[in-house]
Amino acid sequence: MFESARIQTLWELVEYRAGASPGAPMFFDGDGRTATFGEVRDEALRAAAGFQELGIGAGTRVAWQLPTRIGTVIASIALARLGAVQTPVIHLHREREVGFVLAESAAEFVLVPGVWRGFDFTAMARKLAGDGVRVITVGAEGPADGGYGLPGGDPRALAEAPRPYGTADTRWISYTSGTTSSPKGVEHTDASLIAGGVGLATALGMSADDVGSIAFPYAHIAGPDYVIAMLVSGFPAVIIDVFRPGDAAAVYRRHGVTMAGGSTAFYQAFLDESRRHRHELPHAGRLIPSLRLLSGGGAPLPPELYAEVRRELDCALVHGYGMTECPMIAMGTPYDRDEQLAHTVGRPVAGARVRIARPDGSEAAAGEGGEVTVKGPMVFRRYTDPALTAAAFDADGYFRTGDLGHLRPDGHLVLTGRSKDIIIRKGENISAQEVEDLLLAHPAVAEAAVIGLPDRARGERVCAVVTLAEPAAPPPTLAELTAHLRAAGLMAQKLPEQLEITAGLPRGGPLGKVLKTALRERYAAGQGAPDAAGPA
């Protein structure tokens, strides 16, 4: 039985699970490799000794931008054994985001995968790293190399594991993917991440008989959150570095995956894959016969998509709500009713206290809308910017999420909107202001408003609405504007997928603020269609 009260660090949790079920599988990958809980612990000890020889120890700041692989998880666990301060960087980020993170986090080491998927991460890191920052290339892993491409050393030479630090010291700095023009550094302890993982494990009711999956970026806050749930419940997972629905479904069938997901985009991808190949599939046409549960979060779940997935994939669909600052806030369970699962994000997870606040800060009545605020052991410690921290918590210590919603009489949370101007595309937050600022640098653009429009495959798609500097001149195309944004260093996932050119932006109020609600209503109603030049 897991005793959460006595475990405050990730390394303690790894030791606990390796002692409880050392020979049980922890990971399967698409290359046919299997790693047990005991093997992951032992490999992490060797890697920790290797990192220590390189000069990494307690408190060393280490950024890593690595694919979703077994070796990445082992590297992260090894750094946790040393008590390093880890800054995970999503592999999709490029110079603009990575440069900001390395400088703001004061990274002393950077781990990168070399050339992966045609991109040279080592060259980028060396270009961006400041004086005295050491870049370490983690070699490619595969069944033939007999290892994970990590530095190795003698575990007997390791310094004693730092303890206790779980409830007091920052051990993780994760960056928001764009609720403001610049990402915000979010400081977590091991204990806060463990609390989030325990909340997830408790809601989903996973056991050692289940097989999960990690096909989303492990550097996302959901990565450690999910691995902690695995360590708590003792179930293994299939881990995939590149998600392709057909390939993923084949690997999931091979390993008998019972729980899959990641975000709304994953639900839609599996739904489409099932429809395309329904008549070719054995097992009564089920895409993944062993699947009993799809689970995820990161973007709204349309009720109609819920119904279609339930019918087509013949499994439960459990959606939740969390963010970088608080990995788990609310989560549905497999025992909830269809109506609850289709229209809410579940109840607050174990340990989380959710309060709906009115504009004056007072607590809203049951069913009354307001800002979602949350308090509990899974809430982050602070931002790297003290000014942001001061504004993020109310007088009672509740974190202001910036999301709007209400609590139903049955205790389930309903989200109704966002007070922050962000777009959630495939689970990633995109700052409208960041894209707008870059668009305004284009000579053909006079004004720009960037909005999110509903999209079944992505949750939301990015739409740029612009006015022209010279109305009589030929207007820029979407391809021209995205080329301009790429040249400015914007990552592909933030590029607009739809361009609308208008004579003027709707404005209102004493300051003439752009009325984005009016723009969303206008273009969501069909006055404009997505352009194929946008990112997939």
Image (cartoon, helix red, strand yellow):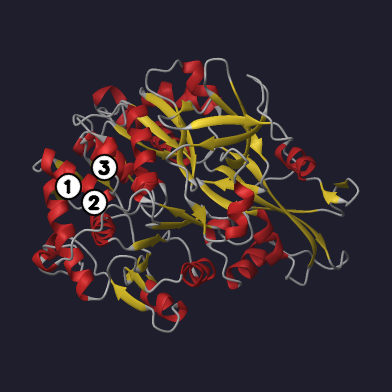
Which amino acid type corresponds to the residue marked 2 in the rendered image? Trp
**Mark 2: few/some/many CA within 10 Å (<14, 14-19, 20+):** many
Q: Can the viewer see residue 190?
A: yes
Tell me if residue 353 comes above or below residue 95 in the rendering: above
Which amino acid type corresponds to the residue marked 3 in the rendered image? Ile
- The residue closer to the viewer here, 103 or 258, is 103
Q: Quadrant of the N terminus?
A: top left
Quadrant of the image occupied by residue 471: bottom right
Tell me if residue 139 comes above or below residue 400 in the rendering: below
Q: Residue at x 28, y 49 (%)?
A: 10
- Residue under label 3, please give it: 7
Q: Nearer the viewer's eye, disc 1 or disc 3?
A: 3
Image coordinates of residue 190 in percent, x first then y, are 34, 50
- Residue under label 2, please give it: 11
Q: Which mark is residue 265?
A: none
> Left or right: 53 with respect to 191?
left
- The residue closer to the viewer here, 473 or 377, is 377
Q: Residue at x 70, y 39 (%)?
A: 524
**Mark 1 or 3 closer to N-term?**
3
Q: CA distance from mark 3 to mark 2?
A: 9 Å
**Mark 3: few/some/many CA within 10 Å (<14, 14-19, 20+):** some
- Residue under label 1, please give it: 15
Q: Nearer the viewer's eye, disc 3 or disc 2?
A: 3
> Left or right: 430 with respect to 112?
right
Which amino acid type corresponds to the residue marked 1 in the rendered image? Glu
- Disc 3 on helix, strand or loop? loop
Disc 2 and disc 1 in contact, CB within 8 angstroms: yes
- Disc 2 on helix, strand or loop? helix
